[in-house]
Each structure stands twice: as C-alpha cells, then as structure tokens.
Amino acid sequence: MAVREWCFTLHLQQPLTPEQSDTLDGLDRFHDGQIGLVESPDRAEFSCLIEAESLTDAIADALSRFEDFPGVLIRSVELNWIALDENGMSTPAVVPAPPPLEADPAA
C-alpha cells in the first residue's frame, strides 16, 4: 500500500491541566507538525494529519504518542465531513452528523 496523509481529530476526555500542558511542551512526538492541540475553555482535541498506509495505522500512530502523556485520555476519534473529503471517503451517501444537543438549563 502507498503511504498517504490521513486527517482526523482525537477528542480528549477533559481539557488539559496546566501540568499536562507543561508536559506536552516537552514531548517531541507532538511537535512534528502531524498532530496539533486545539483548546477551548471546556474541551481539548488534537487535529491530526498523519502519514501512514491506512487510516487504522494513522490512528494507531497518533494514539501511541499518548503513552508518555500521563493522565490524558482519548474520548473519541472523529472523522468529520472535512476529514471524509480529505481522506477521499466522501460519497453522496455520507451526511454530516448533527451537532451535539445542548443540555437543557431548566432541567
């Protein structure tokens, strides 16, 4: 199989703590341009563009980078509509998932 770039997002279980952010700064495997942290006040995720023979190999590569990153847990792997298109997996039968429902503040 030919090596190609695969695009996907890794969603973390929770935002990084200040200590985890400091640890991330010292981990070379997160600074090669293939995986990048995207943060907001209530979430953290890593945008990935990994070179591999298959999507499974690319995801395994990305997940292996977290072995030396204590306490950071991956909640899910997402292939959004942009990733499906970038990965050459977009078809007329693929419809983007609806946005997550907001919690009802009255509940």
Image: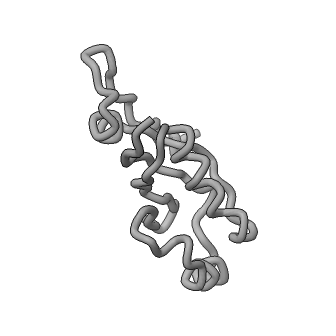
Residue at 72% across / 63% down in the picture? 67
Q: Is residue 103 visible?
A: yes
Q: Residue furthest left?
A: 92
Which residue is nearer to you in this view: 50 or 1? 1
Residue at 39% across / 68% down in the picture? 33
Residue 77 in the image, given as x and y percentages of width and height: 54, 43
Residue 97 in the image, given as x and y percentages of width and height: 39, 29
Instruction: Give left or right: position of 21 versus 34.
Output: right
Identify the image quadrant of the N terminus.
top left
Q: Is residue 39 visible?
A: no
Identify the image quadrant of the C terminus.
top right
Instruction: Give left or right: position of 6 versus 22.
Output: left
Which residue is nearer to you in this view: 32 or 16? 32
Which quadrant holds residue 57? Answer: top right
Residue at 64% across / 81% down in the picture? 23
Residue 70 in the image, given as x and y percentages of width and height: 74, 70
